[in-house]
Image: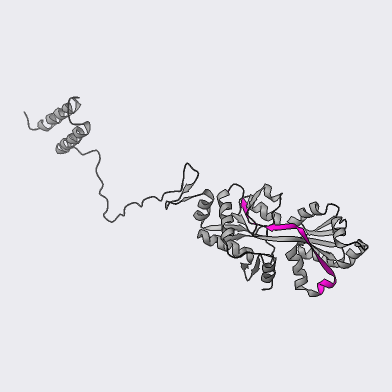
Amino acid sequence: MSSFFAPVLNQTRMRARCLKPSLRRGMGSCLLSAAFLIAGAGAQPAIAATPQPANVPAAAAPVSAPVTTPTGLVQMPDGRLLAPEFARIIGRGELVVAVLSVDQPPFFEEHDGKLTGLDIDLAREMAAKLHVKVRFNRDAHTFDDTVSLLARGQADIAVSKLSRTLSRATVIAFSTPYLRLKRALLLNRVKFAQLAHGRSVPEVVRSYDSTIGVVANSSYAGYVINNFPHAQVRSYATWEDVLKALNAGDVTAAYRDEFEVKRVLKVDPTASLRLRVVTLQDLEDTLAIGVNVNEPALLSFVNQFLADRSTKLDVSTVLQAADH
C-alpha cells in the first residue's frame, strides 16, 4: 500500500468504527480521535482553542436579589427574613416621613435648614431602630395633604401632629396615640358676653350657635361639625389667621386643642384680658403616627416603638418644650 494512502485509509477505518453501534466508546471519543488523525494528515482542526491571558480576573459572583418566600416575607441578600415594608425601607436605606410644610412648634420647625421638634425626634429614633437614615417629605400644605401624601405611597409614615379622625382612618392606618389632648375653645370675652346674656358658659357651649373659627383642612374642621352642629363655621388658612379673626371680633370663638389654645395665653399674658379658655373635658384629640393601610408589620413596629419609648408626652411637657 502506498504510504500516501495510509493515513487516509486509516482515517476511513476510524470513521467506520465510530459508526458501529456496538462500540463501547462514545461518539465524542471517536470524533476526538478522528480530529487528531486529520490533524496528523495535514488538515486544520475546525475549532482552535484561544488561550486566556493570565491576568484576566475571574467573573464576580452575581449578587443575589431579594426573594419572596411562600409566607410573603422577603429574604434579603444577607439572609435575613423581613416583611415587605421593611425590605423596601432597608433596601432603600432611608425612612421617608411625611411632615406638614407649615411649621408647628414644638412638634416640628425648621431652623437654619434643619428640622427639630418632638415629632422629628420620634421619626429620627424610629429610623435609628431600623439602622437607616431619615428623609422628610414636606410637600403637604395642609394636614389632610399629609394624609394624602402617605396614602399615595410617597412616604413610609406620617409624623406631623396628626389627629386621628374617622375620615382619615378610611385611607390610612393610625398607631396608638403618642399624645392625648383635650379639645378647647378660645373665646372673645366681649363677643361671648353679648351672646351669653347672663347664661353660664357650659349652658352656652352646649347649644352654641354663634361664629366659630377653625383651621381649614384640619381635624377641627371635621370635629366642629359634630361637636357644634348649629355653629356658624368659618375656616381660615392658618391658626394665626384664626386668632386675628378672633381678636378682631369677626368670630366669637376659635376651636383647637388645649395646647394651642393655652399657648396663646402663655405667649402673651395680656391676651387673657381679651380672651378666655374653655377646655372641653369630655372631648379628646389624640395625636398618632400614620401608616399605610397595607403594611401591618410596620404598624406593629410603630406601636411597639411607642410602647417601649421611655419619654411620654402630655400637655405639660409639650408646653415646656414650647418655651425652648
Quadrant of the image for the N terminus?
A: top left
Taking the image as shown, residue 290 lies to the left or right of residue 58, namely right
| Spot occupied by residue 36 in the image (x, y as percentages of width and height) | 17, 37
Percent across and percent down for residue 53 are 27, 53
Quadrant including the C terminus:
bottom right
Closest to the observer, 122 or 177: 177
Residue 267's image quarter?
bottom right
Residue shown at 36% from the left, 51% from the top = 61
Report the side of 232 relative to 105 (left or right): right
Say which residue appears at 54% left-offset and 50% top-offset: 85
The stretch in magenta equals: 270-295
Magenta stretch, overall SS: strand
Name the side, left or right, on which 75 lies relative to 13.
right
Residue 120 among those drawn in magenta:
no
Looking at the image, residue 230 lies above or below residue 35:
below
Image coordinates for residue 266, horizontal then vertical, percent: 75, 72
